[in-house]
Image (tube, rainbow, N blue to C red):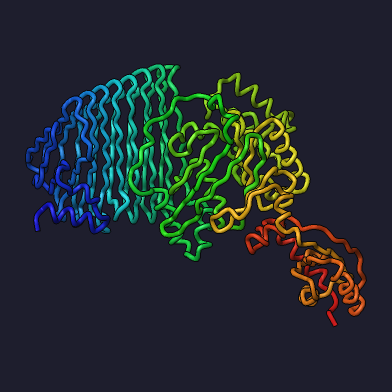
Amino acid sequence: MTHYETIVLSQAASRPLPDFLQAPGVGSLVVEGSNVVVAREVPGLSLEAETISDGVKLMLILAPGVRVAKPMHLCIGSLAEEGIQRIVAEFHIGAGARIEFIACCSFPNAVRLEHVMEGLTFVRPGATLVYRETHYHNGIGGVRVKTRSQVVVEEGGCFLSGISMTEGRAGSMDVGYQVDVAANGLVELVAKGRGYGDDEIIVREDIRLNGHGARGLAKSRIAVHDTARCEVRSTLSGNAPGARGHVDCVEIVSDDATADAVPLLHVNDDRAQLTHEAAIGSVDRKELETIMSRAVDERTATDIIVRGLLGDGLPFEHGLPAVQAAPDNVHSVPAIEVRQLTRDYGQLRAVDGISFSVETGEVFGFLGPNGAGKTTTVRMLTTLLMPTSGTALLNGFDVVHDSYQARRQFGVVPEDSNVYRELTARQNLYFSGRLYRLSREERESRAVELMTLLGMADKLDVLVDTFSRGMRRKLTIAMALMHRPPILFLDEPTAGLDVPGQRSIMDAIRKLSAQGTTLFLTTHQLEEANQLCDRIAIIDRGGIAAIDTPDGLRGLLDDLRVIEVVLRPCPLGAEESLAAMRGVRTTKRTGSSLQLGTADPSSVLPALVAFAEMNNLDIVSLNTRGPSLEEVFLHLTGEAPEAGDEARPARRRRRRCSEGRIR
């Protein structure tokens, strides 16, 4: 077997290589250890390779104006168990040229092996270089990888680079980039990794936006398990007017793993705009429950979610759109438009091609049992999770291709209030405003405006630690609204609140709706949805079961009437006896009240009266009504909504009223 076949097959054991990479006419370079096994040029590309004592020195030069149609394959690795492999590489991409490299780094037998990469890259004016590097390691973690790349992107140039280490044990990965970007240039750095055991993953990025209109994005997605650790340090410098940059870090930890994410932003020109977002934590519990509801254990569900986060391949966002307001025609398009949105976790489909739209200013309820796909859908709409397929637009901005602008269209109120208790309400609001780069004057006026709207103007300078739960929920809503988003996502906004707290939050939602804010509400409280929502979508098993107004949903059961009766005493076994009556479709007990579902109340009522007389029961109250939203929910999903904090008191009341016996 040749060196080429051996190293390629070692990669194919983890993941088959695309056929086109081995097709005639495709440029390729294969290096095993210090041996250049294959060096196949394409027209316009000069490739020089020189063997050095512990590796290979490479020089790749693409002539100006040459646009290589097919990606070039770089296969660099070693079949040795130990030693060192050093790669010293220079890339020169001529003005107006374009090329894409798909690089594979493979170390299938490494026990104590070190791989060192030193790169120098020049992307000349108007040129484009796309570089995707995937690492394939064994399960031992015996490789130590250290890469240092210096990149110069000249005026109008584009450099898109991604590195992925998700197959096998990472071992020790230390990846470093320093990129200088000239006027109207673009750089995107994407890093994905997964570590186990005592693996270590370190990513250091330094992007310097030196020219007018230069753009930069540093994005990382890393998961660590066992005792592994990861560290991401991303530095952005805005050194020129119109420079725009963003740092986006997401790290998931489990077991005894540790993670650090340090975004550093340096604004050296007040006309530059730099932003960042970083998240470190365990997998989302609701998302975990969604997967576990499909009959898999927690560890498998966690693995599925992490694989979904890391995804396949290394997609690029093709740059950050200009920072701007929503388009002028924002009111001519739906606030939220979803078309065939799908999300798969491995072989499991959590969201199955759903479609719906939400109009501007509408209060839209999104209901479903646990595991139905609610959380997964909302995470896709809020750009936290990449759809497998389909489209979602927020005021016309695509959550995948225009994610930067899409994020500016919404605020999020999570189920748990994310306020800082050791700060005052004003300090919390100012902090939120600074995240959205509001000026001091904007922060001051907006804080007063929102606290007045929510009836808490006198609490601005009060420590949040003294607030009730309902007051903290209101402050969370205010923080999500600081940047005046046209859309607000609310997750269980009244969960765990007492009745006055629930009413207060519901009043706040009505006020926001009256001001034209679009509200997307997820809740298990069906009466809350009935009172607040203009329309409601019910999702079940990943698909939309129904969308309509509350009255329209109840109309789905227009042949159902409900008889509500309170009997004294409240006997055990009444449901079973009443369910046996002719004409009774359903029975349900709520406290001391029994509900009988029927198409013909007039035929059931005489039998009900006879039942009470025979068992010496008093009829305390009796009435008939149409179907409730809960009964429609049960009809569509086959299960009642999660009762949450109200379930336990209700069960105690049922035990207390269980008096008497059926004769």
Residue at 23% from the left image edge and 56% from the top image edge: 12
Q: Measured along the vertical axis of the image, is residue 13 above or below residue 423?
A: below
Q: Where is residue 171 in the image (x, y as percent from the top left)?
A: 28, 51
Q: Is residue 367 visible?
A: no
Q: Position of residue 408 (x, y in %)?
A: 53, 31
* Image-based side of 342 in relation to 150, left or right: right
Residue at 42% from the left image edge and 45% from the top image edge: 251
Q: Can residue 306 be seen in this view?
A: yes
Report the number of numbered marks. 0
Q: Position of residue 203 (x, y in %)?
A: 33, 39
Q: Measured along the vertical axis of the image, is residue 436 above or below residue 145?
A: above
Residue at 11% from the left image edge and 43% from the top image edge: 55
- Rendering quarter of residue 501: top right
Q: Which residue lies furthest to the bottom in this view?
A: 663
Q: The C terminus lies in which quarter of the figure?
A: bottom right
* Image-based side of 48 in relation to 593, left or right: left
Q: The N terminus lies in which quarter of the figure?
A: bottom left
Q: Measured along the vertical axis of the image, is residue 79 above or below residue 219?
A: below
**Residue 608 versus residue 214: which sits nearer the camera?**
608
Q: Measured along the vertical axis of the image, is residue 72 above or below residue 168?
A: above
**Residue 334 versus residue 347: which sits nearer the camera?**
334
Q: Where is residue 600 in the image (x, y as percent from the top left)?
A: 82, 66
* Image-based side of 534 in relation to 624, left or right: left
* Image-based side of 604 in relation to 183, left or right: right
**Residue 75 versus residue 416: which sits nearer the camera?**
75
